[in-house]
Amino acid sequence: MFPGSRRDRTISVRTERLDDVLADQELARPVLMKLDIQGAELEALKGAAETLAKTEYVLVECSFVELYDGQAFGDEVISFLRNVGFDLVGLYSPTIVDGLLLQADAFFTRRV
């Protein structure tokens, strides 16, 4: 989908859940969570239940075609956030190739 891009190598990295990393942190309100992590957005959100409960806004990159092995698609991310109390209010910075929406940044606000 992106000319010139290709898998160069695979590296292993240590990961931690957002809830564990932020457990002892006092977050200044309002809280905006921004995620752009190459197809791992849904997994990060699943590890952030406590942090999401303290969050007013979420900006997350959503892919609508497969760009990364094993990634969740935009509809899954949107559904997850709806189920935990957020409403989608806009899609921004869309990447469109040959008329096909590849990805966009989805902006959510906490449902009141």
Image: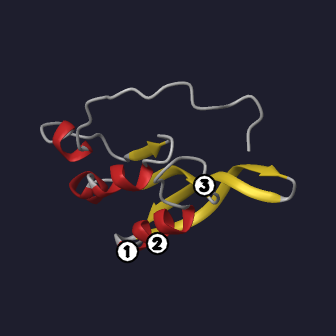
Q: Is 104 situated above or below 15?
A: below
Is label 2 in a helix, a strand or a loop?
A: helix
**Label 3, residues with CA under 10 Å away: few <14, some 14-19, many ≥20:** some
Residue on which disc 1 sits? 83
The answer for how far apart the CA atoms under marks 2 and 3 are is 17 Å
Q: Nearer the viewer, mark 3 or mark 1?
A: 3
Q: Is residue 81 visible?
A: yes
- Residue at coordinates 14% horizontally, 42% vertically from top-left? 23
Question: x and y percent of residue 102 in the render?
Answer: 70, 53
Q: Are marks 2 and 3 in contact (CB under 8 Å)?
A: no
- Residue at coordinates 40% horizontally, 68% vertically from top-left? 80
Residue on which disc 2 sits? 79
Residue on which disc 3 sits? 66
Residue 37: mark in rendering? none
Question: x and y percent of residue 103 in the render?
Answer: 66, 52
Q: Is residue 56 visible?
A: no
- Residue at coordinates 79% horizontally, 59% vertically from top-left? 100
Q: Are marks 2 and 1 in contact (CB under 8 Å)?
A: yes
Report the colour scheme: secondary structure
Sequence-earlier tag: 3 or 1: 3
Nearest to the observer: residue 68 or residue 48: 68
> Number of marks in the image?
3
Is label 3 in a helix, a strand or a loop?
A: loop
Is label 1 in a helix, a strand or a loop?
A: helix
Nearest to the observer: residue 101 or residue 67: 67
Can you name the residue that lies furthest to the left here? 24
- Please indicate whether residue 106 sits to the left or right of residue 19 in the image: right
Question: x and y percent of residue 33 in the render?
Answer: 41, 46
- Residue at coordinates 58% horizontally, 56% vertically from top-left? 106
- Please indicate whether residue 4 sits to the left or right of residue 9 in the image: right
Identity of the amino acid at label 1? Asn
* Quadrant containing the N terminus in the rendered view: top right
